[in-house]
Image (tube, rainbow, N blue to C red):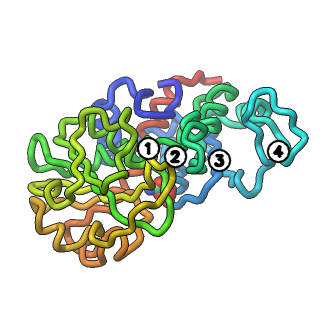
């Protein structure tokens, strides 16, 4: 693995998940990261990604540098050939090159603007770092994907499943703000690669990118989709078709105890942060079916497994 930008960077998902689960059970090898530095750049806020990835790096013996570039750094230019006479003070070419002098691995979080779909899909920030950094780059959530979350979700389902091929339902839920499709995109991509029966349910005009959904069934009737579910992954996303728009805030899509009763006593997942009683009810989040805290705990082991793979590609110099 040269970078960890999306799920296609993983050569063998099952062995990466096995490694993460093994790291959860045993102490790891701090020598691997000794003398190496992880630089984490945040253009947007974070709790879990920031702290779990920092913890993972430290468990591997790495030093960690963290910068909130969105607030503390120079405004970056990503367009090739730009005449920089506006408010952008530094080009990604220099920024990524300089960071590569200080860091052995660079990790970046940069959300989409949710205005221009074509522009967001170009992933200018993530691809800019990938192109101009001379060290591996990790995606800490970009315009279209959140592969550390997707890996965590896959390993959590494999860890908790009680049947060989569980039914997993990804359900849309309402939210007052326009959110990216990055988490559901990665969730679908990872579920398509493990042995589960995946169903997506969302209102009309909320279908995810067809290039991501592929042959996965999409139902617009939430109750029908939830029947016999072993896992329910609840998440809001803004419309892909009418890009970035909120078209529906119908509270009947909130995941509550009544919905849980339709399922096969499903484990309930969410990437967090979650808006209580809008996305998921208190009763579900505080009940025994919710695994959201354990899921967030697994973020450390997913990050550790990825860092371990990338460290393995570095020389000792
Ligand atoms: N799930 C997730 O990425 O959480 P943070 O936004 O807090 O990092």
Residues packed near mark 3 inside 10 Å, few (<14), some (14 to 19) or many (20 plus): many
Q: Earlier in the sequence, mark 4 or mark 1?
A: 4
Disc 2 element: loop
Q: Nearer the viewer, mark 2 or mark 1?
A: 2
Q: Earlier in the sequence, mark 4 or mark 2?
A: 4
Residue at (58%, 29%) from the top-left corner? 136
Residues packed near mark 4 inside 10 Å, few (<14), some (14 to 19) or many (20 plus): some
Say the numbered circle drawn on residue 49: none
Say the numbered circle drawn on residue 141: 2
Extreme residue in the right direction: 85
Q: Position of residue 233 (x, y in %)?
A: 28, 55
Disc 3 element: strand
Q: Position of residue 269 (x, y in %)?
A: 29, 59
Give the residue number, with chain letter if any, for mark 3.
Answer: 41
Nearest the camera: 274 or 11?
274
Q: Mark 2 and mark 3 in contact (Cβ < 8 Å)?
A: no
Q: Nearer the viewer, mark 4 or mark 1?
A: 4
Q: Earlier in the sequence, mark 4 or mark 3?
A: 3
Q: Is residue 19 left or right of residue 35?
A: left
Q: CA distance from mark 4 to mark 2?
A: 23 Å
Q: Is residue 273 left or right of residue 87?
A: left
Q: Is residue 206 left or right of residue 128?
A: left
Give the residue number, with chain letter if any, for mark 1.
Answer: 148
Disc 4 element: loop
Q: Nearer the viewer, mark 4 or mark 2?
A: 4
Q: Earlier in the sequence, mark 3 or mark 1?
A: 3
Give the residue number, with chain letter if any, for mark 4.
Answer: 88
Q: Mark 1 and mark 2 in contact (Cβ < 8 Å)?
A: yes
């Amino acid at each position: 693995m040269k970078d960890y930008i999306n799920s296609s960077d993983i050569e063998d998902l099952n062995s990466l998940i096995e490694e993460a689960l093994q790291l959860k059970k045993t102490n790891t090898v701090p020598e691997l990261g000794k003398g190496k530095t992880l630089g984490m750049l945040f253009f947007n806020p974070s709790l879990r990604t920031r702290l779990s990835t920092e913890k993972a790096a430290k468990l591997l013996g790495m030093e960690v540098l963290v910068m909130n570039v969105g607030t503390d750094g120079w405004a970056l230019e990503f367009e090739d050939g730009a005449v920089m006479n506006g408010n952008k003070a530094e080009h990604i070419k220099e920024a990524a090159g300089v960071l590569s002098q200080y860091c052995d691995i660079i990790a970046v979080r940069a959300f989409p603007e949710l205005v221009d779909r074509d522009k967001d899909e170009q992933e200018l920030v993530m691809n800019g770092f990938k192109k101009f950094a001379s060290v591996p780059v990790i995606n800490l959530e970009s315009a279209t994907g959140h592969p550390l979350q997707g890996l965590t979700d896959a390993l959590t389902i494999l860890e908790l499943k009680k049947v060989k091929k569980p039914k997993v339902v990804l359900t849309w839920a309402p939210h007052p703000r326009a959110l990216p499709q990055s988490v559901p995109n990665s969730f679908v991509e990872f579920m398509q690669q493990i042995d589960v029966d995946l169903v997506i349910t969302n209102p009309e005009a909320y279908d995810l990118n067809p290039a991501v959904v592929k042959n996965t069934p999409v139902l617009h009737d939430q109750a029908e989709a939830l029947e016999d579910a072993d896992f329910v992954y609840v998440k809001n996303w803004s419309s892909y078709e009418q890009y970035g728009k909120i078209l529906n805030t119908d509270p009947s899509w909130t995941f509550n105890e009544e919905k849980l009763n339709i399922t096969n006593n499903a484990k309930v997942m969410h990437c967090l942060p979650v808006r209580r009683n809008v996305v998921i009810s208190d009763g579900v989040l505080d009940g025994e079916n919710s695994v959201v805290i354990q899921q967030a705990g697994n973020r450390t082991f997913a990050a550790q497994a990825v860092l371990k793979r990338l460290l393995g590609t570095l020389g000792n110099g």
